Amino acid sequence: MPQTLAPPASAPAGAPASGTSPDPELSALAERHGLTVSGARPSLSEYVRQLWDRRHFISAFASAKLTAQYSQAKLGQVWQVATPLLNALVYYLIFGLLIGTKKGVPDFVPFLVTGVFIFTFTQSSVMAGTRSISGNLGLVRALHFPRACLPIS
């Protein structure tokens, strides 16, 4: 004998049925007290304004992340500059001296150092931005703020 499914439970009293519009009286009451739909997306201009309002949070959060990241290292934040310089030195030894690429490039050393710094910065920014929201899920769930603050910081 096939089983039959029970009809869905009815919605609580006063709640709008699925697919129907809310009670206009309740909507007016919510609007009068400044309530908005939870999870509603703001317009682009409103979102940018919210980001601008939180610019101090963005800079403080970025500073705190950098301080925490390099707090255990012996040289601290010096590694942010030392790592690209050491990479540039290795590239100079390989491409400049061993392969001889520097002969055809005027100002080879500044060209190389600039490229390594830009590449290192871009790579670390993109990698940190992609992990920023998933790595800060507790913060995302606990506070209401524009989520774009995390990748920007």
Image (tube, helix red, strand yellow):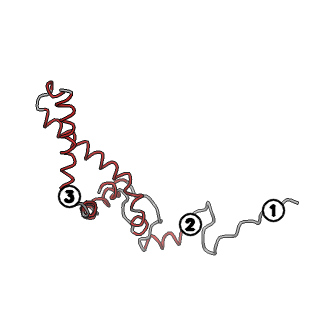
- The part of the image, by quadrant, that contains residue 36 is bottom left
Quadrant of the image containing the C terminus: bottom left
C-alpha gap between disc 1 and disc 3: 66 Å
Q: Position of residue 2 (x, y in %)?
A: 85, 59
Read off the residue under disc 3: 77
Q: What residue type is labelled 1?
A: Thr
Q: Residue at x 21, y 54 (%)?
A: 79
Q: On screen, 26 above or below 99?
A: below
Q: From the viewer's perspective, is the residue at label 3 or at label 2 nearer?
A: 3
Work out whether mark 1 precedes mark 3 in sequence or the reverse, and give the earlier one.
Answer: 1
Q: Which of 32 and 112 is in front in this view?
A: 112
Read off the residue under disc 1: 4
Q: Which of 20 and 101 is in front in this view?
A: 101
- Mark 3 nearby-residue class (10 Å; few <14, some 14–19, many ≥20): some
Q: Which residue is drawn at 34% across and 52% down?
A: 129
- SS at mark 3 in the image: helix
Q: From the viewer's perspective, is the residue at label 1 or at label 2 nearer?
A: 1
Read off the residue under disc 2: 22
